[in-house]
Amino acid sequence: MKNYSIREIRSLKNELYLPIRINQLKTPPQLPTDILHEIFKYLTHSIALNSTLLVCHHWSEVCVPFLWRNIRNYKTLISCLPNESKELLRRNDIIIPTSTPFFNYTQFIKFLSIEKTSLIGLGFESNHFQDVTYSTYPGTVRCLKDLSELTCTSDVFSEFFYHIFKICKNLRLIKLVIVECNITRSLSDLFSAMKDLKHIKIVPNCGWDDFTEYLCELPNSLIKLEIYAQENFMSLSKVERLKNLEEITLCFNDVDSFEGFETCHFPRLKIFELQKASPDGERLTEFLEINGNQLEELYLGSSDSLTNLAIFKNCPNLKSLYTPFLNEEDETLKMILLNCQKLEHVRFCCGTDYLSESTILDLVVTHAPENFYGISLYYPKGQDTGLLSYDLNNFFINWAIRKPLKLIVFSLVNARRALANPKIIDVFEKDEFDVIKRLQIF
């Protein structure tokens, strides 16, 4: 699929906004299919996608795969089953729809969420769930072979996973929601079924005080680990045995969970992200001294001057960075830009306690390495913008004379006040110096 720049999308403006009533046309104006793909992939809300279904048959055909990435209606899904499966359901006194679907919706499904309630909706009683043998059902392999993501709760019987892994060769991610505070059976059976799993996301949703013993049972095949524990404690030092990890994302409120984590060595780690709580500067510095050299992406929800100096000293191969730079840390930012010569994108935190937008823009345009192309300005809740059209315009003037010239991707996050300024919008819209590849607003 072709990627379209802002300028190419603008050239289609007359097609998108024809000054003619749609009911005056025999057929609606048609955009190329790949343009529609590019537009529809950003329509994440089902209401917006539903509206596109009503425009014309062409739009409907392009939209349906996006709309059915997740299962929208189990009755429609059942109507897509092969005749053998439908007959099996009838023999078990399950009423199935008689209508013929317009599309084979099963081929579009990429994500599947399985809980006890949804299984009951398909005719499975939870107390017989361990006896379900999915691989014996006609059409199961065809319907589920392209499944790439599975969400389930920890009280699902482990036998379910054995059959899922047997069928779904493309399964890459399991999101495991821990729902039982006192599990009567060990999670070891569940994890043994995942022995070839590459990516797991763990979301505790109960009052356990300590998850450490379950970390010890994670499969060694993992290359991506996400843990969103927040209020729960777990000793992250137990994760060190997972030597194949290339990406780690952690979200904790309890800084004690990081005790011992600073000495862990992950020889293949490329992406490291800490949301919310972070260990203190000394611990994080020690972690970066051990693992920083191979890191390509580093995201820190909170930071201090000691940590930022450690990034400069230990992370020369970074391509993407997010760390807050407080006031008076302009020299630290300059050293990072000069030392990390592979750096392509930096996300900056803006507001009263952080480096000003004018300082950030000036340092980036002056010292960013030649492959640099992405800058994001993020405004935490309650922080006002200090972005001025004058500073923005000067940044683009100076960026235009950089050699070699890399078109820039400029992102604004939570910048409502800045976007309310017509002078700032004017700078982006005009793009007088032809340096903007894409403007992103979140």
Image: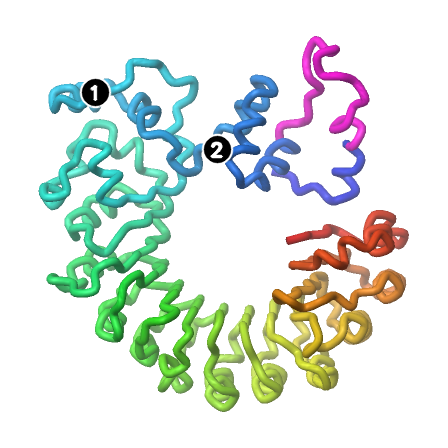
User: Percent position (x, y) of residue 122?
Assistant: 22, 32
> Disc 1 versus disc 2: distance between alpha carbons?
25 Å
Please give left or right for residue 16 compared with residue 269 in the image.
right
Is there any visible trace of residue 272 in the rendered image? Answer: no
Is there any visible trace of residue 46 in the rendered image? Answer: yes
Please give left or right for residue 294 compared with residue 322 in the image.
left
Number of labels in the image equals: 2
| Amino acid type of the residue tagged 1 in the rendering | Ile
Helix, strand or loop at disc 2? helix
The majority secondary structure of the magenta stretch comes to: loop
User: Nearest the camera: 207 or 222?
Assistant: 207
Please give left or right for residue 56 compared with residue 29 in the image.
left
Among numbered discs 1 and 2, the one appearing first in the sequence: 2
Residues shaded magenta: 13-33
User: Percent position (x, y) of residue 288?
Assistant: 50, 83
Q: Which residue is mark 1?
A: 95
Of tags 1 and 2, the one toward the viewer is 1
Q: Which residue is mark 2?
A: 67
Residue drawn at 36 percent across, 79 percent down: 257
Q: Is residue 81 magenta?
A: no
- What is the quadrant of the N terminus in the image? top right
Residue drawn at 16 percent across, 36 percent down: 124
Check the image and report above or below for 387 versus 366: above
